[in-house]
Image (cartoon, rainbow, N blue to C red):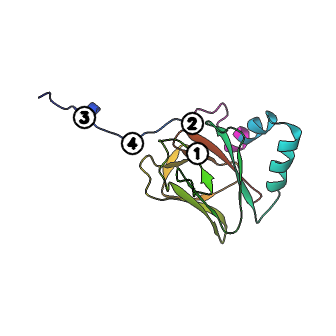
């Protein structure tokens, strides 16, 4: 039997964010610049709202997909019943939730296998701010909200 070395053990998958801009706001602006005016207008309207927010896929198989977040929040996962359905094995069936809080919106990891990352940092819970970059599996999403 071959000896198992630490490099052969299973580890948590972390797919780097690798954005051209270091600031979350810069990433959002760069992404918006690539969209048709009609799409930009919808996202910019949400960015003015204090009570609504949106997730926009900026990397992954559904680039440009938008998901509205209301006061009820959203579930994110690979289960077809998820509000934000991300169909890839790197996403847990019930991966995370975004919920409304007193100060805005917060993302909570639901004990996912590969973790949830905000601006490149692994989080279990995190208060979200406009232009935060969220990574769930191989998907990269931008959080858009009028709350700072």
Q: Where is residue 29 in the image (x, y as percent from the top left)?
A: 77, 39
Residue located 67% across and 55% down the image: 129
Q: Nearer the viewer, residue 48 or 136?
A: 136
Residue located 63% across and 33% down the image: 19
Task: Name the residue beneath numbered marker 3.
Answer: 6
Q: Helix, strand or loop at disc 2? A: loop
Q: Which of marks 2 and 4 is nearer the N terminus?
A: 4
User: Which range of residues does the magenta coloring cover?
Assistant: 17-27
Q: Does the magenta stretch include residue 20?
A: yes
> Quadrant of the image for the N terminus?
top left
**Which numbered mark, 2 or 4, is in the foreground of this view?**
4
> Quadrant of the image for the C terminus?
bottom right
Q: Is residue 98 magenta?
A: no
**Residue 119's disc number:** 1
Residue 148 visible in image: no
| Few, some or many residues within 10 Å of mark 1 (<14, 14–19, 20+) | some
What whole-number distance in Å separates the C-alpha atoms at marks 2 and 4? 15 Å
What whole-number distance in Å separates the C-alpha atoms at marks 3 and 4? 13 Å
Task: Name the residue beneath numbered marker 2.
Answer: 17
Task: Name the residue beneath numbered marker 4.
Answer: 12
Q: Helix, strand or loop at disc 3? A: helix
**Which numbered mark, 3 or 1, is in the foreground of this view?**
3
Position of residue 11 in the picture relative to residue 128 (left or right): left
């Amino acid at each position: 039997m071959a000896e198992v070395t630490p490099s052969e053990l299973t580890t948590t998958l972390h797919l780097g964010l690798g954005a051209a801009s270091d600031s979350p706001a810069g990433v959002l602006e760069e992404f918006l610049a690539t969209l048709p005016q009609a799409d930009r207008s919808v996202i910019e309207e949400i960015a003015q709202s204090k009570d609504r927010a949106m997730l926009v896929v900026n990397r992954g198989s559904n680039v440009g997909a938008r998901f509205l977040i209301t006061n009820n929040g959203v579930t994110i996962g690979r289960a077809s019943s998820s509000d934000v359905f991300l169909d890839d094995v790197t996403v847990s069936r019930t991966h995370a939730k975004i919920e409304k809080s007193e100060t805005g919106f917060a993302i909570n990891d639901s004990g996912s296998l590969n973790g949830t990352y905000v601006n490149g940092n692994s989080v279990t819970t995190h208060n979200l701010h406009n232009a935060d970059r969220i990574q769930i599996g191989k998907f990269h999403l931008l959080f858009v909200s009028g709350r700072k």
